[in-house]
Amino acid sequence: MFILFDIGGTKMRVVSADRKKFLTTPVVVSTPKNFNEGIDTLKRIIENLSNGEPIDAIVGGIAGPLNEAKTGLLKSPNLGEWVGHDLKNSLVEAYKVPVELDNDAALVGLGEANFGAGRDKKIVVYMTISTGVGGARIVDGEIDRNAIGFEPGHQIIDPDNTLCPTCEGNDLEAYVSGTAIEKRFGMKPFEIHDEKVWDELAKFLAYGLNNTIVHWSPDIIVLGGSMMKEVGIPVEAVRKHLADILKIFPTAPQIEKAELDDFGGLYGALSVARAHYFY
């Protein structure tokens, strides 16, 4: 049995699986901001899911760049109290099994590349626009090599806030993330029904995707996260703005919505588990 988890800035998702499929319905809870509360919550869920059965490996993702040893967060705007704690070895000590940890957006991208909207494509870029903004480059069904991690949400798209004087920051995350939108408008994103707002956010996102495309040259970009839902940034508007913005390439790559809903990270963790562990 594998235990797979996805710790985002807002929600924690955990499931048990064999090599082919999930064995249970994923458990979804709010992510505790405090590390000790978080690890206790994760352990409690793992114990309920395993129900005394042997665990072969634990694989999961967490929101933010990891330290070089990939044992915990190096930095995180949404999980600051988790930074510096050894998540991997806390689980190794508790369960005495192999544990692999990666960035949550990278695992969602891996899931979408192998099981979702990016399947059969050689170079997949996944971007999540949610509490924060993250993403990864997937090549031939595997997370591309990197020195620290991928953080496309922190690319600067407007150095002096000319485009958005009320934005608190000048990177893509400060312009289109759910956290930023709630601060800017004083309401939850799903409460906003002004089409002009969503079209402007689509244009901001297209600026970021333009940069990502010219750096990573993907076959497809898959867009996921809470800001891409029915009340959210319209993918068609992103395509339209990108067609006007992208100049150096003759056409933009395919732009599609994620297909795995909120469980892409768990599918990505399953991809890692079945590639590295056998039973």
Image: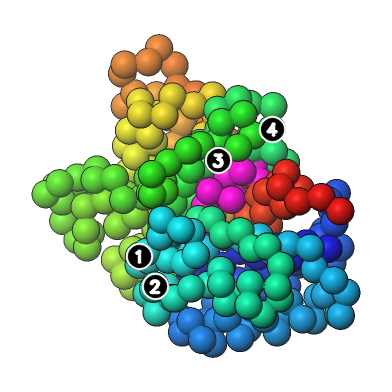
Per the image, the residue denoted by label 1 is: 75
> Disc 4 vs disc 2: Cβ atoms closer than 8 Å?
no
In what element is the residue under mark 1? loop
Q: Where does the magenta region start and end? A: 104-112
Per the image, the residue denoted by label 3 is: 143
Picture quarter containing residue 178? bottom left
Q: Amino acid at mark 2?
A: Val
Per the image, the residue denoted by label 4 is: 119
> Disc 2 vs disc 1: Cβ atoms closer than 8 Å?
yes
Question: Residue furthest toward the top?
Answer: 250
Q: Which comes sooner in the sequence, label 3 or label 2? A: 2
The disc label shown at residue 83, or none: 2
Q: Is residue 98 left or right of residue 164?
A: right
Q: Amino acid at mark 4?
A: Arg
* Residue name at image x 54 percent, y 56 percent: 102
Coordinates of residue 155 in the picture (x, y in percent): 29, 45
Q: Which comes sooner in the sequence, label 4 or label 1? A: 1
* Residue name at image x 34 percent, y 39 percent: 208
Q: Which comes sooner in the sequence, label 2 or label 1? A: 1
Q: How many marks?
A: 4
